[in-house]
Amino acid sequence: MDEEIRAVLAEHAKLPVGISAIGDEDDLFQAGMTSHASVNVMLALEDAFDVEFPEHMLRKSTFESVVAIRAALEELTSARAG
Amino acid sequence: MGVDVGTTPLAHRASKIGRDVAGPASDDVDRLARFPFEAVAALRGERMLSALVPAELGGQGATLGETAQAVTALGRYCASTAMVYAMHLMQLACLVRHGRSENLRTYLRQLTEDQLLLASATTEVGVGGDVRTSICAVERLDGRFRLRKEAPVISYGEETDAVLATARRDPDSPPSDQVLVLCRAPGLELEPVGDWNTLGFRGTCSLGFVLTAEGSEDEILDDPFGDISTETMLPVSHVLWGSVWLGIAAAAVSRAKRYVQGEARKRPGTTPPAAIRLAELATTHQQMAELVSGAINRYESIAHDPQALSALGFAVHMNNVKVATSRLVVDIVGAAMVICGMAGYREDSPYSMGRLLRDAHGAALMVNNDRILANNSQLLLVSREEDE
């Protein structure tokens, strides 16, 4: 899952550094992701993982790090499996 | 039945200042495009510059709603004065909520004691109006900071005691990783650039400046500017701007009402032709007032919850309030002028709409509605229905 998340970030987060320089827990907004870019990340994640983020997840903290994104996606995909 | 402008002590004091000081000076302020010195001195005299400072730091601990009513009350008499007060309160709200260092707490006490005025430097030459991007950066050395910023606008920069400025966190930070810095005497220098000669809000004296500042490192606010913007600056700005415009609208409606009532008195038994327009105007005015009070309630109900404040849906809602109220104020003043006819068109009658109309047209431009709509159009791409 992390590989795919990182692929989405590499394409859409528009970070000034390469995605490989970003640790799993690093703050993506501090690393230079704008709120504009974060919306594109959301859209691309929804497409890549075939999920839809519900309203309560549509906030900055859901997308602030690779770890946070993974947690949100796991919650959504496990809800689907269950 | 007018729209209630509020009955809080703060709004009462604002009304009195509006009637006795800001209103009488407003034509001169407008004609000369000068700062409303006497009205701001009166706000200081009533200790209103510390309205939002918590009681434990010596302030009045007023709510956003109470200050919004005060802003509207001033806006009925002088929109420039109301705008200066509103912009000061926006900065103060950021400082109160996000300035946690001992130094910043001490500064809030000093602000309260000396009734200091705050201004804002969020835009920057070269960023195209995008306040979430900075070129300049804070340089830190031995517990001190230095900053140089080319600001295309700092409203009342020549009169302010301090400026809250955005900048990149440090010289290596990306443009969106911003902090908010309190820049104040003795380390603050503001060199004016250009002049200020606009259609409306002429008393805000929003010149460009080259800002240079140095100070203690703990006068950089603790939270990232992104959070400050989302949780406080944007929602509070939209509420208080809306409140200024509501004051302009209220003044226009009041003139239209007096005009129609004067016509009615001349011919009792015959309803003046403009009366139906006045009835129409009252519905628009009420819509606008409800939008502003709805935004205040929405903000105050979640103000304690940073997660709720950072929800995209909340941002869309507050953006809508700005766009809608800035359009309504133009509609309302325009309709009020038609009601008053030539008496409203004249510059020398008690029903003159000239200044109100010029001020009203500023509303859509200060943080341009097109920019806000572009932002919303993107947020709506991921908007969902509210959760169950």
Image: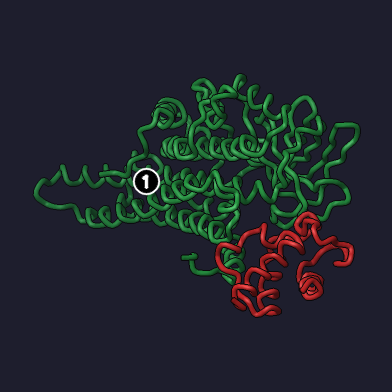
Q: Which chain is green?
A: B
The residue depicted at 36 percent of the width and 55 percent of the height is B287
The chain drawn red is chain what? A
Left or right, B24 with respect to A42, comes to: left
- Residue nearer the viewer, A65 or B354: A65
Indicate the position of residue B227 as horizontal and vertical percent values: 67, 49
Q: Position of residue B70 (x, y in %)?
A: 45, 35
Please tell me how crowded label 1 is: few (under 14), some (14-19), or many (20+) other residues with Cα within 10 Å.
many
Q: Is residue B246 left or right of residue B51?
A: left
Total numbered circles = 1
- Residue A40, given in percent of the width and then of the height, sits at 69, 70
- Identify whether B319 is placed above or below A43: above
Left/right placement of residue B181 relative to residue B255 reads right
Q: Quadrant of the N terminus of chain B?
A: top left
Residue at point 66%, 58% (across, down): A60
| Residue found at the far left of this picture | B269
The vertical placement of B270 against B165, above or below, is below
Q: Which residue is mark 1?
A: B252
Chain for mark 1?
B
Please say which color scheme the image uses. by chain
Q: State whether residue A54 is above or below residue B75.
A: below
Q: Is residue A24 at all visible to an observer of this figure?
A: yes
